[in-house]
Image: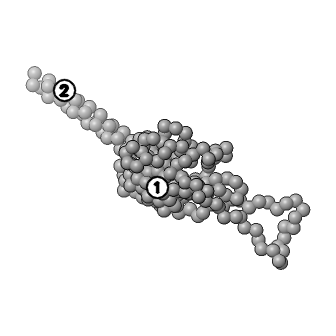
Amino acid sequence: MGRLRRGMTRPVVLGVLVVGLALAGVGLYWFQPWKLWQDETVEEALPQATAAAPAKGAQTGPSPSAEPARPAEPVTVARGELISHEHDTSGTVKLLRLSDGSHVVRLEDLDTSNGPDLRVWLTDAPVKKGTAGWHVFDDGAYESLGKLKGNKGSQNYPLPAGVDPADFSSVSIWCDRFDVSFGAAELAPV
């Protein structure tokens, strides 16, 4: 009888080890804890609209008296300061209108934690301080502007065609994996 128990113990221990390793692998994939120590810095230049093509029949060669046409600088139409939610987050958010009429959300001097599946969301939710603001951004209207390019630096996120920025009042650095805001900014008209 003692040999039978000893012989059955080995497969049970092996089974527990295999299940434990599988669970550890899933946990590592899901939480990606190594990202807490990995910073990704992205420094993008201020966005510019593409220059308009010259009118038909217009002079296209250099003119001795005319300076080359430069696209107009973007106009800041709204701005806000990021506050911390799930993770310490700081920086400035600007809603820019380019000379071609398109809009871009610009994050400047962003500093937040890295994490799995972070997104930049334009939302209609009010920005609330503390834990009360962690989960409000997916309750109403929101537009995902794409994956967060880096957890530090200055970055540009163009609004898709057809999105009216007047329909939104805030920006969130949103963790889609855990449905929580890392930080957010209320957009105030300038």
- Toward the front, the furthest residue is 189
Badge 2 marks a residue whose secondary structure is helix
Colour approach in the figure: one colour
Indicate the amino acid at tag 1: Leu
Q: In this figure, which residue is indicated by the disc labeled 2? A: 8
> How packed is label 2: few (under 14 Cα within 10 Å), some, or many (20 or more)?
few
Proximity of marks 1 and 2: CB atoms separated by less than 8 Å: no
User: Considering depth in this image, is 112 or 188 the residue closer to the camera?
Assistant: 188
- Toward the top, the furthest residue is 1
Find residue 155 and report its horizontal and vertical position in percent: 54, 58
Location of the C terminus by quadrant is: bottom right
Find residue 113 and report its horizontal and vertical position in percent: 40, 54
Q: CA distance from mark 1 to mark 2?
A: 58 Å
Q: In this figure, which residue is indicated by the disc labeled 1? A: 82
Q: For this view, does 105 lie left or right of residue 40?
A: right
- The part of the image, by quadrant, that contains residue 112 is bottom left
Location of the N terminus by quadrant is: top left
Looking at the image, which residue is at 61% across and 59% down? 76
Looking at the image, which residue is at 25% across and 33% down? 16
- Toward the bottom, the furthest residue is 64
Indicate the amino acid at tag 2: Met
Q: Earlier in the sequence, mark 1 or mark 2?
A: 2
Find residue 11 and report its horizontal and vertical position in percent: 23, 30
> How packed is label 1: few (under 14 Cα within 10 Å), some, or many (20 or more)?
many
Looking at the image, which residue is at 64% across and 60% down? 75
Looking at the image, which residue is at 71% across and 64% down? 71
Could you say which disc has been placed on residue 55 in the image? Answer: none
